[in-house]
Image (spheres, grey):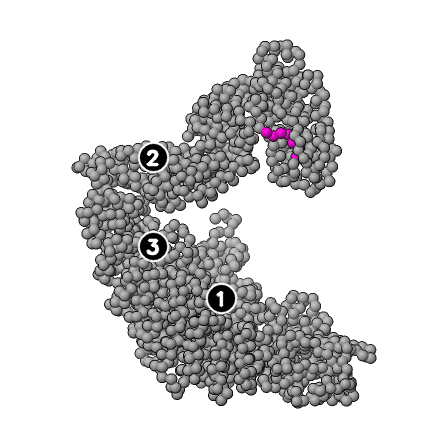
């Protein structure tokens, strides 16, 4: 350690030190239930104790503890410290800070000890466990330094009850006296004054009001040790109300009598559980110590949390009373076991499921389906309510206030918060919000009226009625019985809507608030009239006040709500909405209002249960309901609420100077003139009153009241009720309270129905002298009083809403509800109207009970008139009933079920209804009437009603036999309808669909009537009646799914039902191509069936018990086997289904998912493949081997071996794919057990087959091959290699499997191999991969020395070789069989090609996985074989050596390929090595065959390499290598990679399509067209498939179109020369590289540099001598040109074929520019680079005069593009160009560039639809013209660039532009036309015309066209060259002229100055050339 730096810290303080230093139940942030027990266990678990030190010391450095170092002590450099002891690099001691002693731990290396010793007894932390425990208890009282208690020593009074249920908490009674000793963090410490034992405890500060009574010093200072409440004396405990007796749930086991034996059994189970807890505690404490020492703080804290939780659960376990054991022990045991298993997963990597009794679950005590469900639930995240509840409780206890606020602000977490508070998921989706307002504190001594309601932030409107209460001037409730209300029947959906509790406060006093305040301050309040005046709003969001903290709490502290008032009084009613919208700027604080204290409690129960809770505490309290009906409610509940919103009004000011103080009084009158008493309840009226008086807004003619009135009127009075509104002016003078006007609103229509819900505008009338007293009779007859006058411009606006189950707003319903008062003809009329009237979902829910009882009463009516006309009325009643039942939605159906079960009361309806249904069904079926579909939809409801009516019939008016007969009679037309053809009419089809869907529900009602056998007969009858329409398959199977649950357990029904079930499952279980719905349902049915077979069922007549609700016992093996045998015929179909599903998984084929409807039906089926496999496992587990073999023997041979092959394939796929998670140890072990059973079972059978003398055939060979593959797969499976497992997993696996099964498997494989004899050669391919996989275990053995696994492992075990399985016997067996293969093949065929081929295949795969491992394996295999060949006495050595040589050579080639990294840098090397390997594989072997499959594999490798690097042309060419070796034949080729198993013709077609795609992607459209032509020829002549031919021709046409119109780019070429010492290249090696498209030379150079970082790059063809001396590695890079083919031909470098092709292209004048461009860039093997030279010693003034060009032509070994992107240079040719030839070439090249660019811009203009342009003739030049352009001898004139007559577009219409005419063109449409890219054309024209840029043509003329030059060069060749140069110059002049004309049309406005400059310069250039006779 550096002397001036702080030393390194030790890893972490040990956990025991933290425990002792905490001195309490606190360990980090976690709280323990039993600190003494924890300390004792912790002390016992620690092997290393603290060594005493007891010396003083001095701090050497500053030490600042980390944030999580709760018990670490900060030090200052030089500070004196006292050290008690040390351990693990830590000191324990104390320091003095500001006179206070602080204790803790600190690093040993930070302190230097002195010789001074400490006095004895200072180390209090090293005392005994008893003292430590005592210190912890004291710490829990607050003696720790982190939680100081402030002395109080006062008497207090309890304001509320407090249950004191927690440890060390004190129970309080409301009003009881307590002695308060101290206070800390919101808690008091003290005891109950009346308690003689003075047992102390904690209680909340908010629950206590301190008094001024004196407290004796000795009483206050006396302290006692806290004890848990359970240890206190019952006599001394305070008098607390006992909790209500525990109520048993419906169908709960509490309804049974608890016997002594039951309790004893649970106690025994509890003792075993306690032992398991103790074991876990010791292991977890050790784990915590390890995590802390290793520095894993987060993991350490997780272990702490587990310890904390487990101790709390243990404490709860011990506190369960004997009488509650049956109820409380199972759920608590579930929590504990889940915690233990979660810890097991963290430590060893897996969990073990437990059955319902907490025992380890396996097949001996749990069904296989139950095991699946247990595993699924155990590992499914977040779905175990028991675990979540405890975890959430821990989070709640530990979380800070800020964290809780963050949680509460997340609206999506409301349900989570409720789950957290409940400790479970809600039992019902129904909540009651109990609100109590206990106090309002203000400085104004006036009476207050409060209204509470719940508001929805989403709708920004109230969702409940208002609860009103009145407070006195002192802030206390006037009616103490009205301080609580229940906001009833809230749902989770309501709570998720972001609810706010809104309190509106009105003061009842003076009109002016300031005046009232002044009078109060002066103490002289005046006796003035009092009015309700808006005061303030108090509101709070439920989640912000801690929703989770007031759930299910009987007593919660009051909460202060925020108080706001509107800045303008007129906005008082809209203030809640403004606050919800975030407009807080419109509010202000109310200084005179201090607090509104509200207590809130949310209860998950029904309203009735909530009212009865705590001995009926809430019974009789006001219930505040929602302003809407819930989606589902009990039909028995009635409601008759009518709400009126007093919205606003407009009132005339009259003669008053100021605006009115409007007050409205509302009353209710009947039509007979009588006022309804106690009829209105509203704001300010806690109880119903005779009238309602509105609030008053000061000086406002349009008051915005926004107040809700609830009318409490009987249904009879509501029909005759009217509302009267009387308007007053509120004055401070009592004498001025006279009415100003009045209005009214009738509440019903003329027929008696209630008025619709809407806004009403009520006119007002003047008050005349004779109407001073407004009586009802006056009001009702005002129409006859002519003195009444409407006050124009004055109105009152109100809104109404009816929420009633008794009264309706529908006239037809209203009349039918009173059907007894009308005659039969009227009744028939209204029933017809009823059927024609559509009803909304809410209306149906509201009036369901009234409508149904109305109709049933009509059927049961005994009146004379009804009896006489029943034949007329009853059918119409049934029609009305069908109208209701056939249109039910989901919610209404739930309500109807409740109605039939609990409310229905008609005992004779079934007699009439069955007869009506039978008749109507027959009529409708015969006529296909309009009621057929409604009847089918409602049929099951009608039967439910009939069965319920029969149950209520106590007189037995109809015998049971008669009822059964009547029911079957009604089913007869149902059966007929199901059989009808679906094509007849749509009504038939719809009816069938409805019946199939409702049959399960129908049969549920029949269970109460028919026996099991009778019910089964009905089921079979109806199911077989269903028409075989594919659309009915899913409903039919769903029917069987329900029936399996209803009927399967009835032994009397099995004989009839099981054959039907078997037939249906065999038909539908296989997955279909169009969907898996039928398969999904079939597997779900099979799972339920097999679970029934495995477990015992209920007795006859009982309902089915779901496995999640109760655990059933396992059947005996014999009984289960007998039941399973009834379905054994289903085994082949189930096996094949599983195989198809697993194959799809292997091939990554996405099966169509099941429809949402089917998925919701099959909730237990999660994954189809795993569920199908578990069904097969269950079959084989239940059925003994002899029964299985007997079944297999009874199958025909063709089907038998097909089944066996699928069976063996299934288990192989299952073992390979890890269908189940590797942590599902029990299920995986069971799967392996069954696979071993199948393998062993088939051994003798297949050996006998192998010994048969006749040919085996393909199917039998496949079975034997699959048998070998499965055996080898089993030998590698980790569950059979128990020696490689950790102890826990080994014990579990060995418990299920018993002995080692591998010897039996090896014996079976060897026996079958021996039985095959020479026929074993057919199985080489099947055996070698598996055997090599096992032989690779030797590499693990030798490499790792077979070291045992580390002591602490994750417990996860892979099924791969990495599990370090040491199975020497299996390795020896594999080597023996492999050697036998070689010997046998040589003996039979005299070659070893087959073994060699498949050996190389597997070696290739091994090398690809790991090259190092592949080399080790090859060496091991080579050594073993050499040794065996050397010992062979049958002359096998020579063929063996040949075999090993072939294998070695191929292996070396493959290794060479893989030594290069798989990056783009090494693509050339990888390509070359792959080609070398492919060349070797194409060589024939000894039998004359090539290794085609392996060759194809490396073709595919090369294709993938090119495709990955986007070398698409090379990829396509490589793909054709495989295509060329395939034939259009039906020979089958194996699957490879993404290619499936298919015929050669299919493979060839597929590869042609792939090549086509590659060429298209690489823009080599010509080659893609060739692929299309190949496919087109195949489709036309071979397949006659004109549909695919049309598709390929269409694609071909698109490619031709691309050639003609789409631009494309061609790659660059570079010469690369390696000079110097390179590892993989010879000195002087020359290559031509094909670059990327648009890749520049700098990018290419960087690519080469990355590959050779040490080499020097030289951008020349040859390095200098000095560079060669200074650098070991030099790379020369030169950019190459593609010489025109004509020039290549001229130089004699072209082949004959290339000459002919060039001649054909050059001589055809119709060849377009794109085609010519492709010709010049494709199939290139000749490249050119140029080097300028000057032969004169002195540089001339005109550089062109002495500019010689050396042209070097390179020829490569292959033409580009090819299968690789570089080729060696095989030859080079140099040619020298004279200066004049160079000049002619330069001019010709420039001419061609300009013409090319003009053509490009012209094509772009056509694509952009610019319009026709006047442009040069862009036809392809003739041969002579092309030759002149290329710059060699020509004999004809220059290019024909005449001007065609082309019409211009409207925007460009005008004369042809000459050289100077470009600038005169108008550009009014410049902004509208599309912009063309003309930059390149601009550069070309400027560089050629402007001499200042590029010298122009003047330099050429001055050098070669002057007389002196002609005189010096007068030879014939020179004269011809001069003529050619002159010709090129003339062509350039014409090209430039046409180019300028075209440029004038296309250049944008910004380029106009350049155009003018070019025109001027061009004219000057023409003038200057005249002197040269141009």
What residue span does the magenta drawing correspond to? 1813-1819
Q: Residues within 10 Å of mark 1 (few under 14, many from 20)?
A: some
Q: Determine which of the numbered discs, if any, sits on residue 1139 in the image.
A: 3
In percent of width and height, residue 248 lies at: 42, 79
SS for callout 1:
helix
Few, some or many C-alpha atoms within 10 Å of disc 3 (few <14, some 14-19, many ≥20)?
many
**Magenta segment main secondary structure:** loop
Residue 909: image tag:
none
Nearer the camera: disc 1 or disc 3: 3
Instruction: Identify the residue at horizontal 48%, vertical 23% (top origin).
Output: 1699
Q: Which mark is residue 1481?
A: 2
- Residue 817 is situated, as x and y percent measured from the top left of the image, at 55, 82
Closer to the chain start, of discs 2 and 3, is: 3
Q: Is residue 768 left or right of residue 1340?
A: right
Q: Mark 2 and mark 1: span between their CA atoms?
A: 67 Å
Q: Nearer the viewer, residue 1586 or 1290?
A: 1586
- At horizontal 38% and vertical 70% (from top left) the residue drawn is 975
Q: In this rendering, does residue 593 appear at all?
A: no
Task: Classify residue 1179 by image quadrant.
Answer: bottom left
- State which mark lies toward you, 2 or 1: 2
Does residue 1310 appear to the left or right of 793 in the view shown? Answer: left
Task: Indicate the position of residue 1319 as horizontal and vertical percent values.
Answer: 22, 44
**Which residue matches tag 1?**
395
Separation of residues labelled 2 and 3 (CA atoms) = 35 Å
Residue 778 to residue 1950: above or below: below
Q: Seen in the image, is 390 located left or right of residue 627?
A: left
Q: Give residue 303's quadrant in the image.
A: bottom left
């Amino acid at each position: 350690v550096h002397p001036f730096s702080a030393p390194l810290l030790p890893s972490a303080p040990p956990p025991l030190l933290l425990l002792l230093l905490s001195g309490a139940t606190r360990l980090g942030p976690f709280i323990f239930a039993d600190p003494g027990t924890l300390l004792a266990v912790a002390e016992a678990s620690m092997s290393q104790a603290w060594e005493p030190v007891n010396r003083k010391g001095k701090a050497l450095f500053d030490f600042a503890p980390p944030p999580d170092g709760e018990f670490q002590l900060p030090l200052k450099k030089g500070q004196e410290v006292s050290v008690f002891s040390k351990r693990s690099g830590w000191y324990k001691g104390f320091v003095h800070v500001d006179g206070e002693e602080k204790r803790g731990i600190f690093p040993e290396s930070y302190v230097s000890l002195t010789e001074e010793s400490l006095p004895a007894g200072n180390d209090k932390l090293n005392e005994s466990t008893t003292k430590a425990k005592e210190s912890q208890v004291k710490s829990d009282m607050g003696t720790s330094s982190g939680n100081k208690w402030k002395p109080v020593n006062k008497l207090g009074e309890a304001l509320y009850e407090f249950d004191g249920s927690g440890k060390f908490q004190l129970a309080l009674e409301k009003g009881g006296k307590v002695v308060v000793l101290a206070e800390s963090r919101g808690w008091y410490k003290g005891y109950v004054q009346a308690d003689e034992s003075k047992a102390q405890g904690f209680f909340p500060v908010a629950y206590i009001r301190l008094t001024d009574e004196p407290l004796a010093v000795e009483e206050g200072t006396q302290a006692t040790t806290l004890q848990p409440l359970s240890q206190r004396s019952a006599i001394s405990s305070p008098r607390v109300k006992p909790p209500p007796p525990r109520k048993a749930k419906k169908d709960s086991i509490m309804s049974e009598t608890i016997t002594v034996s039951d309790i004893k059994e649970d106690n025994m189970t509890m003792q075993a559980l306690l032992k398991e807890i103790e074991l876990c505690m010791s292991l977890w404490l050790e784990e915590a110590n390890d995590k802390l020492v290793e520095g894993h703080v987060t993991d350490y804290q997780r272990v702490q949390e587990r310890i904390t939780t487990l101790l709390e659960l243990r404490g709860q376990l011990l506190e369960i009373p004997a009488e509650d054991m049956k109820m409380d022990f199972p759920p608590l045991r579930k929590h504990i076991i889940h915690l233990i298993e979660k810890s097991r997963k963290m430590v060893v990597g897996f969990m073990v499921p437990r059955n319902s009794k907490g025992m380890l679950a396996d097949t001996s005590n749990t069904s296989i389906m139950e095991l699946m469900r247990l595993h699924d639930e155990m590992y499914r995240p977040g779905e175990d309510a028991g675990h979540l509840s405890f975890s959430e409780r821990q989070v709640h206890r530990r979380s800070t206030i800020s964290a809780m606020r963050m949680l509460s602000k997340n609206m999506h977490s409301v349900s989570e918060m409720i789950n957290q508070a409940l400790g479970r998921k809600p039992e019902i989706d129904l909540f009651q919000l109990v609100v109590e307002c206990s106090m309002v504190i203000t400085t104004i001594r006036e009476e207050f009226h409060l209204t509470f309601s719940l508001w929805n932030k989403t709708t920004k409107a109230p969702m409940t009625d208002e609860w009103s209460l009145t407070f006195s001037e002192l802030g206390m409730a006037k009616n103490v019985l009205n301080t609580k209300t229940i906001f009833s029947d809230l749902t989770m959906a309501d709570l998720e809507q972001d609810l706010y509790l809104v309190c509106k406060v009105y003061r009842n006093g003076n009109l002016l608030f300031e005046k009232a305040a002044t009078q109060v301050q002066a103490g002289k309040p005046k006796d003035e009239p009092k009015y309700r005046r808006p005061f303030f709003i108090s509101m709070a969001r439920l989640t912000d006040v801690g929703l989770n903290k007031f759930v299910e709490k009987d007593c919660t502290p009051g909460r202060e709500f925020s108080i706001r008032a509107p800045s303008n009084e007129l906005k008082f009613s809209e203030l809640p909405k403004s606050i919800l919208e975030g407009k807080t700027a419109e509010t202000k604080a109310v200084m005179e209002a201090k607090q509104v204290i509200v207590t809130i409690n949310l209860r998950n129960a029904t309203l009735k249960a909530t009212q009865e809770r705590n001995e009926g505490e809430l019974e009789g309290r006001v219930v505040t309901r929602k302003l809407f009906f819930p989606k589902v409610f009990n039909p028995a509940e009635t409601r008759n609420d009518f709400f009126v919103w007093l919205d606003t009004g407009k009132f005339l000011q009259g003669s008053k100077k100021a605006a009115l103080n409007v007050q409205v009084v509302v009353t209710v009158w009947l039509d007979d003139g009588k006022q309804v008493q106690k009829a209105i309840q509203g704001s300010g009226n806690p109880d119903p009153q005779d009238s309602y008086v509105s609030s008053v807004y000061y000086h406002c003619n349009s008051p915005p009241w926004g107040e809700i009135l609830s009318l409490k009127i009987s249904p009879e009075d509501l029909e005759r009720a009217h509302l009267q509104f009387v308007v007053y002016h509120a004055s401070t003078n009592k004498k001025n309270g006279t009415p100003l006007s009045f209005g009214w609103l009738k509440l019903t229509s003329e027929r008696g129905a209630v008025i619709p819900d809407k806004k009403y505008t009520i006119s007002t009338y003047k008050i005349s002298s004779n109407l001073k007293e407004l009586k009802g009779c006056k009001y009702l007859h005002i129409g006859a009083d002519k003195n009444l006058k409407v006050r124009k411009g004055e109105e009152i606006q109100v809104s109404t809403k009816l929420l009633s189950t008794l009264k309706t707003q529908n006239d037809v319903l209203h009349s039918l509800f009173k059907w007894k008062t009308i005659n039969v003809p009227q009744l028939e009329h209204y029933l017809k109207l009823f059927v024609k009237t559509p009803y909304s979902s809410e209306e149906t829910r509201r009036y369901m009970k009234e409508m149904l009882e109305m109709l049933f009463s009509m059927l049961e009516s005994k009146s004379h008139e009804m009896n006489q006309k029943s034949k007329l009325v009853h059918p119409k009643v049934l029609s009305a009933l069908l109208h209701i039942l056939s249109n039910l939605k989901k919610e209404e159906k739930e309500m109807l079920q409740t109605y039939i079960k609990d409310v229905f009361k008609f005992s004779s309806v079934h007699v009439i209804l069955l007869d009506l249904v039978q008749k109507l069904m027959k009529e409708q079926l015969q006529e296909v009437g309009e009621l057929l579909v409604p009847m089918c939809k409602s049929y099951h409801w009608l039967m439910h009603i009939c069965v319920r009516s029969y149950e209520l019939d106590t007189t037995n008016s109809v015998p049971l036999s008669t009822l059964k007969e009547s029911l079957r009679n009604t089913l007869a037309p149902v059966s007929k309808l199901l059989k009808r053809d679906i094509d007849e009419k749509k009504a038939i089809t719809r009816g069938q669909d409805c019946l199939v869907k409702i049959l399960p529900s129908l049969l549920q009602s029949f269970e109460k009537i028919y026996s099991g056998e009778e019910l089964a007969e009905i089921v079979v009858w109806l199911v077989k009646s269903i028409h075989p329409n594919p659309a009915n398959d899913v409903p039919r199977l769903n029917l069987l799914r329900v029936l399996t649950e209803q009927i399967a357990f009835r032994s009397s029904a099995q004989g009839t039902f099981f054959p039907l079930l078997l037939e249906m499952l065999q038909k539908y279980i296989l997955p279909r191509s169009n969907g898996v719905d039928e398969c999904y349902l079939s597997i779900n049915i099979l799972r339920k069936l097999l679970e029934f077979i495995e477990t015992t069922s209920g007795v006859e007549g009982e309902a089915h018990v779901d496995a999640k609700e109760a655990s059933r016992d396992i059947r005996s093996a014999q009984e289960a086997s007998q039941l399973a045998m009834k379905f054994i015929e289903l085994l082949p179909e189930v096996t094949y289904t599983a195989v198809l599903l697993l194959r799809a998984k292997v091939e990554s084929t996405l099966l169509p998912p099941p429809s949402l409807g089917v998925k919701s039906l099959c909730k237990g089926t999660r994954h189809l493949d795993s569920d199908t496999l578990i069904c097969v496992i269950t079959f084989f587990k239940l059925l003994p081997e002899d029964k299985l073999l007997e079944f297999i023997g009874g199958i025909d041979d063709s089907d038998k071996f097909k089944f066996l092959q699928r069976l063996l394939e299934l288990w192989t796929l299952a073992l390979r794919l890890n269908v189940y998670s590797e942590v599902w140890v029990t299920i995986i072990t069971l799967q392996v057990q069954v696979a071993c059973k199948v393998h062993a079972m088939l051994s003798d059978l297949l050996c006998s087959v192998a010994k048969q003398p006749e040919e085996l055939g393909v199917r039998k060979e496949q079975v034997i091959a699959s048998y070998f593959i499965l055996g080898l797969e089993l030998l590698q499976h980790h569950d059979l290699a128990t020696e490689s497992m950790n102890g826990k997993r080994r014990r579990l696996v060995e418990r299920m499997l018993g002995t080692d099964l591998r010897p039996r498997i090896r014996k079976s494989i060897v026996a079958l191999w021996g039985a095959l004899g020479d026929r074993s050669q057919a199985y080489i391919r099947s055996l070698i991969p598996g055997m090599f996989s096992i032989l690779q275990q030797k590499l693990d053995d030798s490499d790792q020395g077979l070291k045992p696994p580390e002591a602490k492992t994750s417990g996860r075990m892979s099924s791969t070789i990495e599990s370090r399985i040491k199975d020497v016997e299996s390795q020896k067996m594999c080597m023996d069989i492999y050697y036998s293969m070689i010997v046998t093949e040589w003996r039979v065929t005299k070659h070893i090609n087959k073994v060699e081929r498949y050996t190389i295949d597997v070696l290739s795969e091994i090398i690809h996985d790991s090259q190092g491992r592949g080399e080790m394996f090859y060496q091991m295999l080579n050594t073993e074989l050499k040794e065996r060949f050397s010992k062979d006495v049958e002359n096998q050595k020579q063929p063996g050596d040949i075999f090993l040589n072939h294998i070695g050579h191929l292996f070396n080639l493959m290794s060479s390929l893989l030594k290069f990294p798989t990056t783009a840098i090494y693509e050339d090397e990888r390509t070359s090595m792959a080609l070398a390997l492919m060349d070797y594989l194409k060589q024939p072997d000894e039998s004359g065959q090539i290794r085609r499959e392996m060759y194809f594999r490396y073709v595919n490798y090369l294709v993938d390499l090119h495709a990955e690097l986007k070398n698409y042309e090379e990829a396509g060419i490589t793909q054709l290598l495989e295509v060329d070796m395939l034939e259009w034949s039906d020979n089958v080729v194996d699957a490879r990679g993404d290619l499936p198993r298919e015929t050669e013709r299919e493979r060839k077609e597929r590869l042609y399509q792939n090549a086509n795609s590659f060429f298209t992607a690489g823009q080599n459209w010509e080659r893609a067209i060739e692929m299309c032509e190949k496919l087109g020829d195949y489709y036309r002549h071979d397949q006659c498939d004109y549909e695919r031919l049309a598709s390929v021709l269409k694609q071909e046409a698109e490619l031709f179109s691309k050639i003609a119109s789409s631009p494309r780019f061609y790659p660059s070429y570079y010469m690369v020369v390696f000079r110097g010492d390179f590892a993989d290249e010879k000195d002087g090696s020359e290559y031509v590289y094909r670059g990327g498209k648009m890749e520049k030379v700098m990018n290419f150079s960087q690519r080469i540099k990355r590959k050779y970082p040490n080499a020097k790059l030289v951008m020349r063809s040859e390095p200098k001598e000095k560079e060669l001396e200074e650098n070991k590695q030099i790379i020369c890079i030169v950019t190459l040109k593609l010489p025109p083919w004509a020039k290549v031909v001229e130089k004699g470098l072209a082949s004959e074929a290339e000459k002919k092709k060039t001649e054909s292209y050059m001589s055809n004048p119709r060849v377009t520019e794109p085609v010519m461009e492709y010709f010049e860039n494709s199939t290139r093997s000749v490249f050119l680079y140029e080097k300028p030279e000057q032969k004169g010693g002195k540089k001339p003034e005109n550089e062109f005069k002495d500019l010689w060009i050396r042209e070097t032509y390179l020829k490569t070994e292959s033409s580009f593009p090819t299968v690789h992107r570089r080729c060696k240079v095989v030859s080079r040719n140099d040619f020298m160009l004279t200066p004049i030839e160079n000049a002619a070439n330069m001019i010709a090249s420039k001419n061609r560039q300009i013409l090319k660019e003009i053509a490009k811009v012209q094509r772009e203009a056509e694509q952009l639809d610019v319009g026709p342009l006047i442009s040069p003739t862009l036809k392809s030049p003739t041969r002579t013209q092309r030759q002149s352009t290329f710059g060699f001898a020509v004999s004809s004139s220059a290019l024909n660039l005449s001007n065609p007559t082309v019409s211009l577009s409207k925007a460009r219409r005008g004369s042809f532009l000459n050289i100077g005419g470009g600038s005169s063109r108008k550009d009014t449409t410049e902004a509208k036309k599309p912009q063309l890219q003309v930059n390149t054309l601009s550069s070309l024209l400027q560089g050629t015309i402007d001499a200042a840029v590029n010298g122009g043509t003047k330099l050429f003329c001055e050098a070669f066209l002057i007389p002196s030059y002609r005189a010096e060069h007068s030879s014939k060749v020179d004269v011809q060259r001069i003529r050619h140069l002159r010709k090129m110059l003339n062509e350039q002049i014409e090209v430039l002229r046409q180019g300028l004309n075209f440029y004038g049309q296309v250049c944008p406005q910004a380029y106009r100055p350049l155009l003018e400059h070019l025109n001027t310069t061009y004219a000057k250039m023409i003038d200057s050339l005249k002197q040269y006779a141009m």
